[in-house]
């Protein structure tokens, strides 16, 4: 599994369950060391699938949906879209996956894509990439 796929999948899934924008989840995971832990585990167990990592996050955070209303129902669309955007950023700026994820999730565009109400999750990867490059 690619690092970007792992990071995006975990951010978007947790965003959905906790009803928190994915850009805020990324910042929180980054500050708490969760991203480093995920990537270290990926290096140790590269054969593991996404369910393993979601289970790991689940165990560490007592992951369960506790939101009264969910504004992040389209996490699966974002999870499918964003690894391509991250790959484009990494290639364009000669970054590794983590650096590209940091660039993405700390952007104004990520905040817009994170919100279902903007419907940015319906845009193509190229459109999202162009918005990022215009920032």
Image: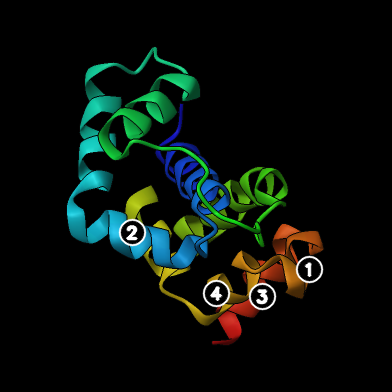
Quadrant of the image occupied by residue 127: bottom right
Q: CA distance from mark 1 to mark 3?
A: 16 Å
Q: CA distance from mark 4 to mark 1?
A: 12 Å
Total numbered circles: 4
- Choose the circle earlier in sequence order: 2 or 1: 2
- Which residue position holds label 2? 99
Quadrant of the image occupied by residue 135: bottom right
- Residue 26 picture location, percent across and down: 38, 59
Q: CA distance from mark 3 to mark 4?
A: 15 Å
Nearer to us of marks 2 and 1 is 1
Q: CA distance from mark 2 to mark 1?
A: 26 Å
The crowding category of the residue bearing disc 1, from other C-alpha atoms within 10 Å (few below 14, some 14 to 19, many at least 20), is: few
Q: Is residue 30 left or right of residue 134?
A: left
Q: Is residue 70 left or right of residue 2?
A: right
- Which residue position holds label 3? 130
- Choose the circle earlier in sequence order: 3 or 4: 4
Q: Residue at x 66, y 75 (%)?
A: 130
Nearer to us of marks 3 and 4 is 4
- Residue 24 picture location, percent across and down: 41, 67
- Choose the circle earlier in sequence order: 1 or 3: 1
- Residue 5 picture location, percent across and down: 50, 39
Name the residue nearer the viewer: 18 or 12.
18
Q: Are marks 4 and 1 in contact (CB under 8 Å)?
A: no
Quadrant of the image occupied by residue 124: bottom right
Q: CA distance from mark 2 to mark 4?
A: 17 Å
Name the residue nearer the viewer: 134 or 122.
122
Secondary element under disc 4, as helix, strand or loop, is helix
Secondary element under disc 1, as helix, strand or loop, is loop
């Amino acid at each position: 599994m690619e690092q970007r796929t792992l990071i995006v999948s975990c951010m978007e899934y947790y965003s959905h369950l906790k009803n928190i924008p994915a850009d805020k989840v990324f910042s929180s995971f980054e500050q708490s060391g969760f991203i480093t832990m995920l990537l270290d585990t990926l290096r140790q167990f590269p054969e593991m699938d996404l369910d393993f990592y979601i289970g790991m996050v689940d165990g560490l955070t007592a992951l369960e949906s506790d939101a009264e209303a969910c504004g992040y129902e389209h996490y699966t669309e974002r999870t499918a879209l964003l690894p391509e955007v991250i790959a484009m950023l990494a290639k364009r700026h000669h970054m590794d996956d983590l650096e590209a994820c940091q660039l993405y999730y700390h952007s104004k565009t990520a905040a817009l894509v994170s919100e279902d109400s903007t419907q940015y999750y319906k845009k193509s990867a190229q459109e999202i990439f162009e918005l990022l490059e215009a920032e």
